[in-house]
Image (spheres, rainbow, N blue to C red):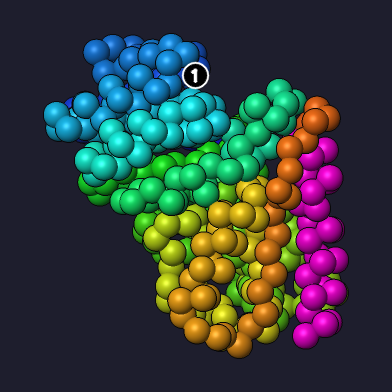
Amino acid sequence: MRNAFAKTITSEASKDPRITLLSGDIGNRMFDKFKTAYPDRFFNCGVAESNMTGVAAGMALCGLRPFTYTITPFVTTRCLEQIRVDVCYHNAPVTIVAVGAGYSYATLGSTHHACEDIAFMRNLPGMTVICPGDAFEVEAAVHAIIKQNNPVYLRLGKKGEPLIHESAPDFEIGKGITIQEGSDICLLNTGNTLPIAIEAGKKLKKRGISVKVVSLHTVKPLDNQLLKEAFTSCPLVATIEEHSLIGGLSGAIAEWLADNGPMNAHFCRIGTPDKFFHLTGSQSYLRKQTGLTPKSIADLLENRLLEI
């Protein structure tokens, strides 16, 4: 995903002289092509993410289109006040690009885990929250972001994520992408767990269960029409995300359900627990510990469907 972002932002910068890229002392080699082509539009702000956010806000208010980029906790939690006051209060068109969603940097310990960021960002007035499911969705998201004029949070995985689409899909902010149709369960995924959701769907299909899989790449604003259809056409709707069950996609949809009255479907939330991990392991290890594997998800959803 991060390579797709670097490639796309470099291409877009050739068309739009307003685009600037600010890095929190990361991604220097990855952005070599951008720096070579546009040396006066790349700024390594060092390990000073709060200052980087303030600089980006100032650039945006002067007519530029800045993108800030670094590891997720450091571009969100560390500078939350600056995002709130400098960016969102002024509705400045800054795009905050976070690399390392969920447990992508699991081996570096809990300081680098990112399971609360969607909750922080979607709670800020005026902020759009986008979590692409693969590299092609990253490419399409960047194209869409540049066409709008408000703060955006773009949440990326890391590298090596499987490609789901054959090319950049039709992408509209606030509109989900249906990957496959089904009628028994609707799996609503956001972000880098999309391959897991698809594999879980395949396992359920082998068990005779029809599964609809959706890439709900935009957590804010939600796709109201898609949610209405999901909760009226399938007996079970489930959310999947590498993020805490508190405040993430599942929290957003639970709030949506409270506001939109009773629906026909039962609702199942799959995500990370409300806890820190004090043991270090790989991303796959932590996914196993938290039930974010195709088999665990398929087993859970089959049992929930049988209970209905």
- Left or right of residue 181, residue 140 in this image: left
- Left or right of residue 260, residue 274 in this image: right
Magenta highlight on residue 152: no
Q: Position of residue 198 (x, y in %)?
A: 69, 59
Can residue 145 be spotted in the picture?
yes
Front residue of this view, candidates 242 and 252? 252
Q: Residue at x 55, y 31 (%)?
A: 73
From the viewer's perspective, is residue 252 above or below residue 103? below
Q: Residue at x 50, y 33 (%)?
A: 77
Which residue is labeled 1 in the image? 27
Kind of residue at badge 1: Gly
Residue stretch in magenta: 283-308
Can residue 143 be spotted in the picture?
no
SS label for mark 1 = loop
Q: Residue at x 71, y 48 (%)?
A: 274
Q: Position of residue 182 (x, y in %)?
A: 65, 77
Image-quadrant location for residue 39? top left
Q: Quadrant of the C terminus?
A: bottom right
The furthest residue to the left: 62
Q: Residue at x 84, y 45 (%)?
A: 289
Front residue of this view, candidates 88 and 302? 88
From the viewer's perspective, is residue 105 above or below residue 40? below
